[in-house]
Image (cartoon, rainbow, N blue to C red):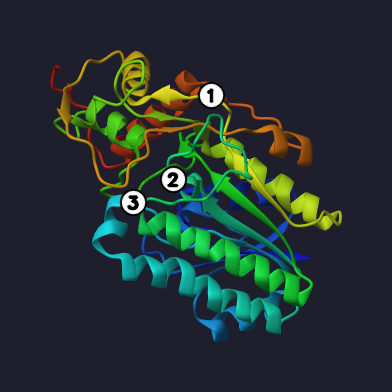
Amino acid sequence: MTVLVTGGAGYIGSHTVRALADAGESVVVIDNLSTGFSHFLPENVPLFIGDAADENLVEGVIAQHNVESIIHFAGSVVVPDSLRDPLGYYRNNTMTTRNLLNAAVKCNVSRFIFSSTAAVYGNPDYMPVPEEAPTRPLSPYGSSKLMTEIMLHDVASAHGMNYVVLRYFNVAGADPQARIGLATVGATHLLKIAVEVATGQRAKIDVFGTDYPTADGSCIRDFIHVTDLAQAHRAALAYLNQGGPSVTLNCGYGRGYSVLETIEAVRRASGRNFAVQYADRRPGDIMTMIADTTRIRATLDWTPQYDTLDTIARHALAWEEKLLGERGTEPRQALSA
């Protein structure tokens, strides 16, 4: 049995491919390398460079490699970009998945794992947010993912497919051995920006909104280490392989950290001070988002291994310093706050 991973050369995808390969799974990847890196993949994992929306490509890979399960990462993920280009997000996220599902149905693929997001909830009525909470996305990014969830449910019901939808909270960190990590130029992830500032690659970090009704006025997020998230995908595949019914699961730790607390964690990890600039709230940003993790812990054989903010910050920083070393540059002194 082979697993097809779309977007498998990207940040979360590459960590998941390694987790699957380390567990002895047969894996094949489709990625257009728009934000992914082929050298992040283990040498024995075949890579097809192309679009997950290309049904001919997908059907050919499924047939050639006897694919029985699909893990679908490929898509666009930046909330502010989705507000500027909603049609691009509906194309890359919703329409691409429609084509991928069509190919899967034609080829009798019976198991599907979908990379979704906590952004489908919008601003929840209470915390921590359970999977059955109302879905009221505040951005085209969140809406495109929610539309895909609905489509997947309908397709699975019509064609006897079982699926797991994993709603990610804030993914951060890097491989503990610093083999792979977030390398996308211009990444918008909070931890990634913070470690770039700490290593002198950016002049400052912007904090958008300091007047939220939270303890320190900044937004609160439930961070999950990318390696733990990769293991959640491995566990979800095992769940489906054992005949588990379709399910939607939150992927987080069930505790929240503010933006300012996150910045302090990077300062501790780096031993460096750096400049922070305060700005107005951004459209589409959610004030507080913390996962209710009761269901995922009861459903999957999954126990997080790296579930502290300091660990996440330390691994993100180690990866960033490795990237700098590979470019032949040393971390510069960050600008003082």
Position of 140 relative to 281 (above/below): below
Q: Position of residue 135 (x, y in %)?
A: 52, 50
Tell whether label 3 touches label 2 (CB within 8 Å): no
Q: Nearer the viewer, residue 41 or 68?
A: 68
Quick one: label 2, few (<14), some, or many (20+) residues within 10 Å? Answer: many
Q: Which residue is the site of mark 2? A: 122
Calculate the distance from the C-alpha at mark 1 to the C-alpha at mark 3. Answer: 22 Å
Amino acid at dot 3: Val
Tell me if 123 is positioned left or right of 321 in this view.
right
Q: Which mark is residue 255?
A: 1
Q: Which mark is residue 79?
A: 3
Q: Position of residue 129 (x, y in %)?
A: 56, 35
Position of 322 relative to 59 (above/below): above
The N terminus lies in quadrant? bottom right
Amino acid at dot 2: Gly
Which mark's residue is nearer the viewer, 2 or 1? Answer: 2
| Circle nearer the N terminus (2, 1) | 2
Name which residue lies at 73% across and 55% down. Answer: 25
Q: Position of residue 264 (x, y in %)?
A: 33, 17
Calculate the distance from the C-alpha at mark 2 to the C-alpha at mark 1. Answer: 18 Å
Amino acid at dot 1: Arg
Q: Nearer the viewer, residue 172 or 281?
A: 281
Instruction: Give the quadrant of residue 307.
Output: top right
Which mark's residue is nearer the viewer, 2 or 3? Answer: 2
Quick one: label 3, few (<14), some, or many (20+) residues within 10 Å? Answer: many
Tell me if 188 is positioned left or right of 56 in this view.
left
